[in-house]
Image (cartoon, rainbow, N blue to C red):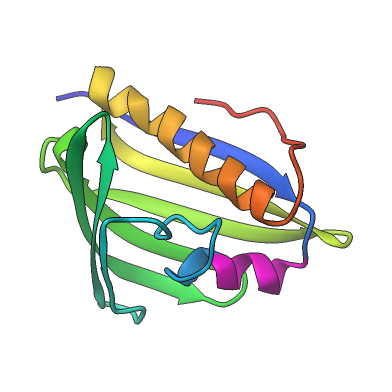
Amino acid sequence: MKLIDINVTRVIPAPVERVFDVWIDPKSPGGPWHGAERVILNLVVDGLFYFAVKHEGRRWPHYGRFVRIERPHRVEYTWVSEATKGVESVVEVTFEPRGDQCEVTLCHSGVPDDEMGHKHQEGWTWVLSMLAERFGSGASSPASA
């Protein structure tokens, strides 16, 4: 099976620490875990997570473990879902200061090169849009595959 990397970047109008804290807190609107039907999150290195989201009339479970947590600049975790065909992929999110703003770069590597795999681009772009909305911005940087 051929695998690809998905890359998405967005500038968020908030300090790095605030953006990082929203990203890792399932109770914070704008974060990737917020609004999931169910979330179990053990935010430590080798800690496991599970979350299920409803999309297109279905429940989509996701699983993984945290590989690296470097507040406020980086979080990395494995990612397994039906859309990865059970293959363990890796999500790395970096948070870089850009003046008084934060550039968030997400790289999801090891995603199957098929229709379901490519939908991760759309999904992660939406997640970063929700994060930007949380801080009151619709501005974005171009995303690249």
Tell me where residue 44 appears, x and y as whole percent: 35, 82
Residue 3 visible: no
Residue 95, compared with residue 124, is above or below; it is below
Tell me where residue 85 appears, x and y as whole percent: 12, 35
Residue occupying image coordinates x 70% and y 59%: 96
Q: Residue furthest top?
A: 115
Q: Residue furthest right?
A: 99
Residue 76 visible: yes
- Given residues 130 and 82, the one toward you in this image is 130
Judged by its main secondary structure, the magenta piece is helix
Tell me where residue 10 appears, x and y as whole percent: 67, 42
Residue range highlighted in magenta: 15-22
Instruction: Say whether residue 121 is left or right of residue 102.
Output: left
Residue occupying image coordinates x 26% and y 77%: 47
Does the magenta segment cover residue 108? Answer: no
Q: Which image quadrant is residue 100 in?
A: bottom right
Does the magenta segment cover residue 18? Answer: yes
Q: Residue furthest front?
A: 57
Q: Which image quadrant is residue 117 in?
A: top left
Q: Please state, as top left, top right, bottom left or bottom right, where the N terminus lies in the image.
A: top left
Give the total number of marks visible in the rendering: 0
Q: Which image quadrant is residue 108 in?
A: top left
Residue 42, compared with residue 141, is above or below; it is below
Residue occupying image coordinates x 46% and y 71%: 27
